[in-house]
Amino acid sequence: MEYIKDAKTDFILSNDIRIPIRVRGRKEIIEKYHKYYSSERMNDHL
């Protein structure tokens, strides 16, 4: 997940490759990504 630059309708990787997020379950996938990203940022500040 460290290589994901953005996640809206697709995951955009740090090398600008787009990986589509399936429509079914998209909300849950994005929420899990944001939760992971937030927890990683908190760990970086410790």
Image (cartoon, rainbow, N blue to C red):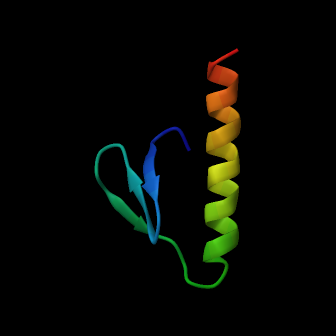
- Residue 15 screen position, x and y as percent: 29, 45
Quarter of the rendering occupied by the N terminus: top right
Q: Quadrant of residue 20?
A: bottom left
Q: Nearer the viewer, residue 2 or 42?
A: 42
> Image check: 3 left or right of 31?
left
Vertical relation: 26 (above or below) 7: below
- Residue 35 screen position, x and y as percent: 70, 49
User: What is the total number of numbered labels drawn onto the structure image?
Assistant: 0
> Image check: 33 left or right of 9?
right
Vertical relation: 12 (above or below) 14: below
Q: Nearer the viewer, residue 46 or 14?
A: 46
Q: Quadrant of residue 38?
A: top right
> Image check: 26 left or right of 7?
right
> Image check: 24 left or right of 13?
right
Residue at 45 percent of width and 72 percent of height = 9
- Residue 26 screen position, x and y as percent: 61, 75
Residue at 62 percent of width and 21 percent of height = 44
Q: Nearer the viewer, residue 17 or 7?
A: 7
Vertical relation: 44 (above or below) 4: above
